[in-house]
Amino acid sequence: MEYPKIFRMRQKFDAPTVKDVPAAVRAEVRRIDPGARIKAGQSVAITVGSRGVANVDVIARTLVEEMKALGAKPFIVPAMGSHGGGTAEGQAEILARYGVTEQTMGCPIKSSMEVVEVGETDFGMKVYFDQFASQADHVIVFNRVKPHTGFRGEIESGLFKMMLIGLGKQKGASLYHRAIIHHSFDKIVKAVGQMVLTKCKVAFGLGTLENGYEETAMIRAVRPEEFEPVEKELQKQAKAWCPKLPFKTADLLVIDEMGKDISGAGMDTNVIGRKGNDRVAQPDEWPKIHHIFTRDLTETTHGNAVGVTFASFTTQRLVDKIDRHSTYINSITGQHVAAAHIPMSYDTDREVLDIAFVSIGLTEPPDAKVMWIKNTLDLTEVEASEVFYKEAQGRADLEILCQPRPMRLGADGNLLSFEEMGRAVTRTAVAAK
């Protein structure tokens, strides 16, 4: 079969960047005067989640140092719902993979799946909170603010979600996701969040935003009484900076890797156009992608393949890496059982492409609209088929890096990796000089 030729481009995003992350954290923390609340000798629990937050280790360590400067006794709590296989050991291991350990942070890491009940909402839902955090004199809620992969609203993924899902652990996360069947996400997040702020000794929050290049773009310390209005403000900005695919429609999107470190949904639904439905974009949702081919899992996801259902096709090598326990428990906790459903899988990329290109209607394979990315978090460079080349030439936000060339498969029938294709472009450019 003749495949379309592809070319590589670099996207130009609006990209404010925090140049000195530790200094920015210190300035923001001191701006809100935490010493007015936190006294020497008091314990402080600091949340760290399971997402691939830019500079997560640097930010967490700086928070620890700031608390020590006050004479307080900080410790870190893994705040990540059911991730890590729903075990205390698994959640501590996730933090270690981000460089967050007792040695690097200079403080204890207290990981537990045990929770305490702190109250009940006015609509009869119990509220749970991490046991170790509940025993601290103060809690610092640290998280990245960004669009949620499943819900739309003024508050999506950020500080409130960390108080609900992260600090609620598996028991709380499971309950709140079940409650979404009967109540709106907005209603739940505000009710539970306000109860946590009232009863769980939250000293302050620290929200971060990232630009389209996965760099820290903003750091904001938030007093407890400001959580709701400030998070709404940060969410608007996060959506404005959220990276996107360069074109609104495609017959096929190829994604090299997916995983929980990339997105809570494995693949960011805001990027692939699957926020409203697993397999097709809603009428008001973009981009509109006919088929998705997901090639592999990240190593860091440790077999958690939640979200693989968004793909029409995958490889047997991805399927062989799936940890059914962690994938199932995560999808059940999130009340999205279909998220663990495995799509059609084949031994080689060639087999997938041959099937995909005869599954896009009357369009001939060489004329297919194809985009290819490393993952939904890294959208700086994108490969696209020749049919997009003329449009790309006329856009100031796209830098074309090479002429269209064949999609390259190895002797094993598999595509080169997205990164290998990029290195080939770099070598060609260097040789041309």
Image (cartoon, rainbow, N blue to C red):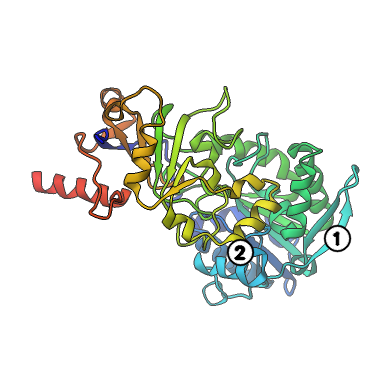
Q: Give the camera-side residue of 191 and 422.
A: 422
In this rendering, the answer to whether 216 lies above or below 74 is above
Amino acid on which disc 1 is placed: Glu
Secondary element type, mark 1: strand
Res 383 → quadrant: top left
Tell me the quarter of the image containing the N terminus.
Answer: top left
Q: Residues within 10 Å of mark 2 (few under 14, many from 20)?
A: many
In this rendering, the answer to whether 75 lies above or below 327 is below
For label 1, the residue is 117
Write the residue at 38% across / 43% down: 352
Q: Position of residue 52 (x, y in %)?
A: 51, 55
Q: Give the camera-side residue of 2 and 129.
A: 2
Circles 2, 1 touching at the beta carbon (< 8 Å)? no
Write the residue at 29% across / 48% down: 415
Amino acid on which disc 2 is placed: Gly
Res 429 → quadrant: top left
Q: Position of residue 396 (x, y in %)?
A: 31, 27
Secondary element type, mark 2: helix
Q: Which mark is residue 84?
A: 2
Q: Position of residue 217 (x, y in %)?
A: 48, 45
